[in-house]
Image: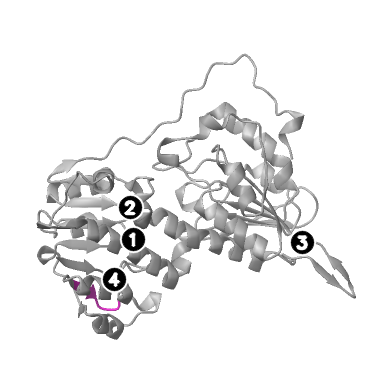
């Protein structure tokens, strides 16, 4: 196979292949082409790639390659230059009609990392998890450098400084990494998620679980992902979380629903109720935001309702791209493992008997294989919304 990785457009800093994975692919008999300066932002020079066995070129002839590995979703003009039967491996969302139409018309097999099934075997190709690991870590660092106080407990001759209080909403890979990082920095951490397994997962990394008294089955989607709550349940969740957020120094939100806008977890009123100097980090700001008022790539100052002073809302765009060296290394390994599935006894082939390829392929041989995005479950009619119970808070 001939496998290529382009230089990603700014502001993306990651690269789809690193010298380590290039060396492994060339040892397996594949040809690898890297666009000039593709890895510079991630700490890899063109000479590094050449030593690993790649050909470094100023521009990739997309019509002459078998596999294109990428990070940023491909624009339609690049897709049109791919040869029919080629394979693209990378992040594809948002799944716009224009992009899907271009992939379908080009006759390429588009393997979207967002659609890799949530199975044990597929973990080696799970880019969402590998990049969420970096993102969760980055969220805590963004909060720590802005918070005007210590994270850890400090006992000194001048007095005792209490630890910061951190609330994490969303206990997926990013949330668990955020909890673990905040704990390592010495903070007290509480967390919430709507999936049934989340309480045990939060406690396993040292957080106190915030029970909001909801039926967790409502928040469980397919493949272990969360599902958006209905309006009534979302309002109850916000009401139960409000006092915990108000008491926190730092709020970190990492809750996403595949294929949909980020659920709104914290309203403007909930944020304003925090102490002056508090920090909110919204990892999903670029997807609509878990926090009302967050803007991707910006720090937004809002007045605290508890006195003079402001709360800082940090809207992240692609937090994993702020750690390009390690994020690229993990991403490239996911790409390598996906390429291995295409290397069959009969040569380069896409065989849908493999459940990973079956799940990840959103287009193939001129057909759109993408299933419609899941919709929130309909709400049961109720005469009166149930108020949060006293026992909901811990």
Q: Residues within 10 Å of mark 1 (few under 14, many from 20)?
A: many
Foreground mark, 1 or 2, reads 1
**Which residue, given by chain and number where applicable, does mark 3 sit on?**
163
Element under label 4?
A: loop
Foreground mark, 4 or 1, reads 1
- Residue depicted at 23% across the width and 74% down the height: 34
Q: Earlier in the sequence, mark 4 or mark 1?
A: 4
Q: Earlier in the sequence, mark 1 or mark 2?
A: 2
Are the residues tagged 1 and 2 within 8 Å (C-beta)?
A: yes
Query: What span is in magenta?
Result: 32-37
Q: Is residue 348 left or right of residue 328?
A: left
Image location of residue 263, percent across then percent down: 52, 40
Position of residue 135 relative to residue 7, above or below, is above
Element under label 2?
A: helix
Are the residues tagged 4 and 1 within 8 Å (C-beta)?
A: no
Alpha carbon separation for disc pair 1 and 3: 37 Å
**Which residue, given by chain and number where applicable, does mark 2 sit on?**
113
Position of residue 43 relative to residue 82, above or below, is below
Foreground mark, 3 or 4, reads 3
Q: Residues within 10 Å of mark 3 (few under 14, many from 20)?
A: some
Q: Main secondary structure of the magenta part?
A: strand
The tag on residue 334 is 1
Alpha carbon separation for disc pair 1 and 2: 9 Å
**Which residue, given by chain and number where applicable, does mark 4 sit on?**
7
């Amino acid at each position: 196979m001939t496998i290529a990785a382009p230089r990603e457009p700014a502001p993306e800093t990651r690269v789809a292949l690193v010298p380590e994975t290039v060396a492994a692919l060339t040892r397996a008999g594949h040809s690898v082409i890297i666009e000039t300066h593709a890895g510079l932002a991630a700490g890899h020079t063109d000479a590094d790639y050449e030593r690993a066995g790649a050909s470094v070129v100023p521009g990739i002839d997309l019509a002459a390659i078998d596999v294109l590995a990428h990070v940023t979703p491909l624009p339609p003009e690049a897709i049109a230059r791919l040869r029919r039967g080629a394979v693209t491996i990378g992040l594809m969302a948002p799944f716009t009609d224009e992009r899907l139409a271009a992939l379908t018309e080009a006759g390429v097999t588009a393997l979207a990392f967002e659609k890799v099934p949530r199975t044990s075997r597929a973990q080696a190709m799970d880019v969402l998890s590998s990049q969420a690991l970096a993102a969760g870590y980055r969220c805590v660092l963004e909060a720590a450098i802005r918070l005007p106080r210590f994270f850890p407990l400090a006992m000194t001759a001048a007095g005792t400084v209490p630890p910061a209080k951190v609330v994490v909403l969303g206990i997926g890979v990013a949330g668990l990494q955020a909890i673990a990082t905040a704990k390592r920095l010495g903070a007290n951490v509480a967390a919430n998620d709507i999936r049934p397994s989340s309480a045990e997962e939060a406690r396993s990394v040292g957080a106190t679980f915030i029970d909001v008294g909801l039926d967790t089955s409502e928040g469980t989607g397919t493949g272990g992902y969360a599902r958006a709550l209905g309006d009534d349940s979302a309002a109850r969740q916000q009401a139960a979380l409000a006092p915990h957020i108000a008491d926190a120094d730092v709020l970190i939100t990492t809750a996403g629903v595949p294929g949909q806008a980020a659920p709104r977890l914290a309203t403007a009123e909930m944020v304003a109720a925090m102490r002056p100097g508090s920090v909110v980090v919204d990892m999903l700001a670029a997807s609509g935001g878990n926090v009302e008022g967050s803007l991707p790539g910006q720090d937004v100052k809002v007045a605290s309702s508890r006195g003079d002073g402001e709360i800082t809302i940090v809207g992240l765009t692609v937090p994993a791209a702020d750690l390009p060296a390690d994020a690229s290394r993990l991403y490239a390994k996911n790409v390598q493992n996906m390429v291995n599935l295409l290397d069959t006894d009969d040569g380069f082939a896409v065989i849908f008997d493999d459940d990973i390829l079956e799940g990840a392929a959103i287009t193939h041989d001129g057909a759109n294989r993408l299933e419609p995005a899941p919709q929130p479950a309909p709400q049961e009619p109720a005469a009166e919304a149930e108020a949060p119970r006293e026992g909901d808070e811990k």
